[in-house]
Structures are given as C-alpha cells and as structure tokens.
Image: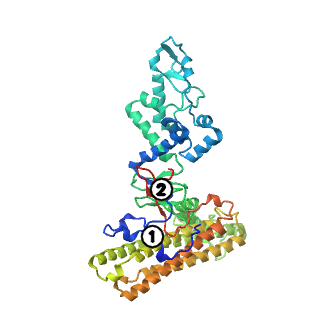
C-alpha cells in the first residue's frame, strides 16, 4: 500500500472533493487547492483533444518504426495501443516479423507483373464473382498481391463495416490474413460508410486500449481517461470518481470481484429468498410459504391444509404438543438437516450484519456531504461580510477536515463488504485454516474499529458551531481537527497495510484481488491533456 512517510494533516496538500457542485464559484480555487508534488499518472482526454492524443501515438510509431500512418494505426490496434509492447516486438523480432504478425504486407512492385493479366492486356478476371473481361481500372490489387474487382471489394468492405469489423478488415483471398489498406476502403465505399469506418478507427484508440477508457459518467461527459498503470482509482475532470479496472464506483478496499459480488448480492432478491427458505415451509397443498412464529409442529395453512413443520408432510388435525397422531417423520434425529438449517441461518445473519454496517456508513457519507455543504456556505457567507473574520481568514483546515472525513467514511463503508468476502467461504475458503481465519479477522476488525472510532470523533468535532467561536476557541478547534485528521490518516494507512501484508499478500489468489492503494491526498485527479501534448514531456 502507500508507504509514504507520515505527514502532518495540517501541512498536507489540500484534499480535493469529487463533486463539482460543492465547489462554490465564489470561493477562490487557490484557497482550496495546492499543487501536487506527485507526478501525474492519469490524464483526461476530452472530445476536442482525442484527435491530438491519437495523432501523437501515430506520429511516434511512424517516426520510430518508419511506417506510414495507416500501417502505424494497424500496428497500434493489433497491440492494443500499447507502444511499449509494440516496440519490444520490433526490437526482439525485427520489423518484418512485427508487420507480419499485425497483418501488414509491404507492397512488392514485382507483383504488378503477375496475376490474371499480362502487361499488354487491359482485361482481367475476378476470382470472387467469376467475371471475365473486367477492365483493369475496375480492379484493385491490395499490397498482399491479391486483386479483385471493385464491386466485390465494395461489398466486402460494406459487410465488414456494418458488422462492426472496421478496425481489421482482412483480404478476401482464402487464408490471407493481410489487412486491407484503409485508403482503398475509403475510396470504394460510400461517403456515409467511409465516415462510419473512420469513426470506428477513431474510437479504437479508447475501446481497444488497456490504458484508456471512457469515463462512465451518466450522462456521458465525453471524456476518456488514460491511466499509465491501467489500474486503481481516478477522478475525471467532470468530478466523477471511479475504479479504472471495472468502471464501477470507487470501491477500495474491495477488489473489483468483491465489489461485483457485493453489488449483485445487495441488488437482487437472493437474500429475501434465502430468508423465506430458512424461515418458512411450503404448504404441501397450495405450495405457498408458511411462517411459524411459535407453537407446536402442527401447521394449518390458509388453504385449510394441515402439515408437519418438521418434515412438511400433510397430516391430520389430531395432535399433542410433541406428536401428531398417525404421523412419524423421524426428523428429530436428522442431524444433517439441522446443520444445514443452522448454516443457512448463520449465513443470513452474517450477511445482514455486514450489510447494516455498510448501509449505516453509506448513509453517513450523505450526511457528511450535507455538513460539508453547510460549512462551505458559512465560509463563503462570512468571508463576504467579514463577520468573524478571524475564523474564515483561512478556513482551508475545515475544508481539509471535511474532505478527509468524506473519503475516510467511504473507505470505512467499503471495508465491510471486504470483511464479508475476505473471511467468508465464497472466495478464500481454502486459503486459511479456521484458526488462522479467526485470528486474522480479529486483527483486521480491531484495525477497522480503531479507524471507525477516530472517524466518529472527527465527525463530531467538525459538527461544532465554530463560526460562533472566538479566536481562542477557533485555535483550539484547528488543533483538534489537525490531530484527529492525522489519527484518521494513520489508522487508514495501517488498515491498508494489514490488507496488503497480512491478508491479500500471503494469499495465492491475491493477484486476482488487487485493490487501489490508499492515498492521503485522495483519489488521483486526472490532468487534462492539451492539444500541444502532455506536460513534462511524457510519452503518451
């Protein structure tokens, strides 16, 4: 996880918040943000700069590999716009092998003297439509050497483009894997289809890259995000924070798989069905579930049918507290059935416990959001009127505290689904012995409780009416917020270190459960890519 040296909360860079609606336009941005010393690894590519960003990649490939633009694009699409991988193949295998793998054939002028026609003839034949006597100007030869009539090429291109296969349209010849020249495609198809073809090529830059993804905002902001490491969490310039791996909401310390399973578990009705299965029995006549609140084992459904609660079998009405006349189900000694029932109840209770913890802190995040809006409103109002100027002359410490509270509360809420799966039987059943599982669970939940305790203290402190305080009280509160902020930050780091070193680290499946590292300054904000290229001379 984050191994940065511990920094004083009061001296850290400002904590950016993800929602633009909380950034009051009348608050000076310089008052709320400080420049980060970290080298940015994420960049926002707007609709306007997408062409320039793609062109930068193409120019780089053309310059270093000495290929034309269409060939550079075919190479980059084949290697998923990963120039490092492309260049490694070039160095290790040579240019010819690199081109052949991507389906690029370098034009051989000698091929012009072969084919279905001699130099002197102007009539040719097409092996696709089996037409003879086709004028040479109505035939097109690709760089692989195969020549067919323009009508057949046009039909081939049209079908491929409409089927969404624009990015790698192969030659029509049998077993030929050469990629058709994009210039020829544009020339032979209609203008509308050529536009669609170019759009597919253009969108390939985002959709085929492991390092570039569309921002998942709804409605879509139009931005794409490039992340150099291709993983972790990021904030788009539109304000949305999300997981780069699964494009879901930022969910650290849950892995993507944990969050996917948890989201499904919370969204569907499986737990309701589970409760009904555990707590009811089906009437043997009308097949409706019946719930026993108390009493003996003889049940009477609303349809009038009597049945045994223990085995579900239909019975008569004569009974005592311990037996039903004429009925013997033998379920009293069915230990396996009893164990299954107890396990189902235990699993349901376990899920309910962690869900309530998760939901409680998710709701608290919303309350913290409202508190931050209220504090920001007070800050703006008082800075305008100069009322209690001593308090609001520098109120960054309040904003920092609220941002830290907001982020920490979100992390805490996601830590409960993490515990649910980390110490449950769905993902890591065979990774730990029962004794080891219990020890590690106690260790982590102790870290979690300490983190939770400091968050509640910080929340309580930030809720004080500091706008009514005198200078001495404000000074005392600033120190309290600073100390609590440092404590929350330190506890959160230790919790992530526990996950990394003691839980997922030793697990043989840990690589499948990568989690976004904790950052004291918050989720990384992607830097906007400009048409002039990336700042700092980074390779893009």
Q: Nearer the viewer, residue 79 or 365?
A: 79
- In this view, 377 is above or below 531: below
Q: Position of residue 424 (x, y in %)?
A: 64, 67
What distance separates the C-alpha of mark 1 from that of mark 2?
24 Å
Please identify, in this view, whether the residue under mark 1 or under mark 2 is nearer the observer.
2
Residue 390 quadrant: bottom left
- Numbered disc 2: secondary structure: helix
| Identity of the residue drawn at 41% across and 50% down | 532
Q: Is residue 207 left or right of residue 341?
A: left
In this rendering, does residue 345 appear at all?
no
In this rendering, does residue 466 appear at all?
yes
Q: Which mark is residue 519?
A: none
Q: Position of residue 311 (x, y in %)?
A: 65, 66
Q: Which residue is mark 1?
A: 15
Residue 15 quadrant: bottom left
Q: Position of residue 411 (x, y in %)?
A: 52, 69
| Identity of the residue drawn at 64% across and 58% down | 511
| Identity of the residue drawn at 47% across and 75% down | 11
Q: Nearer the viewer, residue 471 or 132?
A: 471
Q: Is residue 168 left or right of residue 395?
A: right
- Numbered disc 1: secondary structure: loop
Q: Position of residue 385 (x, y in %)?
A: 26, 78
Q: Which mark is residue 536?
A: 2
Q: Nearer the viewer, residue 412 or 288?
A: 412
Q: Quick one: label 2, few (<14), some, or many (20+) residues within 10 Å?
A: few
Q: Earlier in the sequence, mark 1 or mark 2?
A: 1
């Amino acid at each position: 996880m984050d191994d940065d040296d511990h920094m004083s909360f009061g001296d850290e860079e400002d904590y950016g918040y993800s929602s633009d609606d909380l950034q009051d336009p009348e608050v000076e941005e310089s008052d709320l943000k400080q420049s980060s010393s970290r080298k940015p690894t994420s960049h926002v590519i707007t609709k306007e700069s997408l062409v320039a960003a793609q062109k930068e990649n193409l120019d780089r490939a053309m310059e270093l590999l000495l290929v034309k633009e269409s060939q550079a694009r075919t190479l980059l699409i084949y290697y998923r716009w990963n120039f490092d991988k492309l260049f490694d193949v070039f160095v290790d295998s040579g240019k010819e092998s690199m081109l052949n793998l991507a389906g690029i054939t370098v034009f051989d002028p000698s091929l012009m003297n072969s084919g279905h026609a001699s130099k002197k003839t102007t009539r040719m034949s097409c092996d696709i439509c089996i037409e003879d006597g086709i004028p040479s100007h109505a035939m097109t030869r690709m760089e692989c050497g195969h020549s067919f009539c323009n009508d057949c090429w046009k039909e081939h291109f049209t079908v491929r483009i409409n089927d969404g296969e624009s990015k790698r349209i192969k030659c029509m010849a049998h077993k030929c894997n050469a990629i058709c020249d994009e210039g020829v495609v544009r020339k032979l198809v209609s203008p509308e289809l050529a536009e669609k073809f170019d759009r597919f090529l253009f969108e390939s830059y985002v959709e085929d890259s492991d390092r570039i993804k569309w921002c998942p905002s709804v409605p879509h902001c139009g931005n794409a995000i490039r992340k150099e490491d291709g993983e972790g969490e990021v904030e788009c310039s539109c304000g949305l924070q999300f997981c780069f791996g699964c494009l879901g909401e930022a969910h650290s310390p849950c892995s993507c798989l944990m969050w996917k399973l948890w989201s499904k578990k919370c969204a569907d009705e499986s737990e309701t069905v589970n409760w009904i299965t555990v707590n009811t029995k089906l009437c043997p006549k009308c097949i409706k579930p019946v719930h026993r609140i108390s009493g003996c084992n003889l049940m009477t459904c609303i349809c009038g049918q009597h049945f045994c609660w223990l085995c579900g079998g239909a019975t008569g009405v004569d009974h005592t507290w311990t037996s039903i006349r004429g009925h013997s189900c033998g379920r009293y000694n069915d230990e396996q059935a009893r164990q299954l029932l107890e396990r189902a109840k235990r699993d349901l209770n376990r899920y309910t416990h962690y869900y309530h913890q998760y939901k409680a802190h998710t709701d608290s995040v919303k309350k913290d959001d409202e508190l931050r809006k209220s504090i920001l409103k007070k800050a703006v109002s008082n800075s305008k009127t100069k009322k209690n100027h001593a308090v609001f002359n520098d109120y960054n410490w309040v904003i920092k505290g609220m941002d830290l509270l907001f982020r920490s509360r979100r992390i805490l809420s996601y830590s409960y689904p993490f515990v649910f799966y980390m110490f449950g039987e769905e993902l890591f059943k065979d990774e730990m012995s029962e004794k080891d599982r219990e020890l590690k669970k106690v260790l982590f939940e102790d870290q979690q409780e300490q983190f939770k305790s400091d968050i509640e203290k910080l929340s309580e402190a930030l809720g004080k009416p500091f706008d009514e305080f005198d200078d001495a009280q404000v000074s005392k509160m600033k120190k309290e917020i600073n100390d609590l902020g440092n404590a929350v930050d330190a506890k959160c780091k230790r919790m992530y270190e526990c996950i990394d070193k003691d839980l997922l680290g030793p697990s043989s499946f840990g690589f499948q459960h990568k989690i976004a590292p904790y950052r004291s300054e918050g989720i990384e904000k992607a830097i906007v890519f400009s048409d002039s290229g990336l700042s700092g001379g980074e390779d893009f």
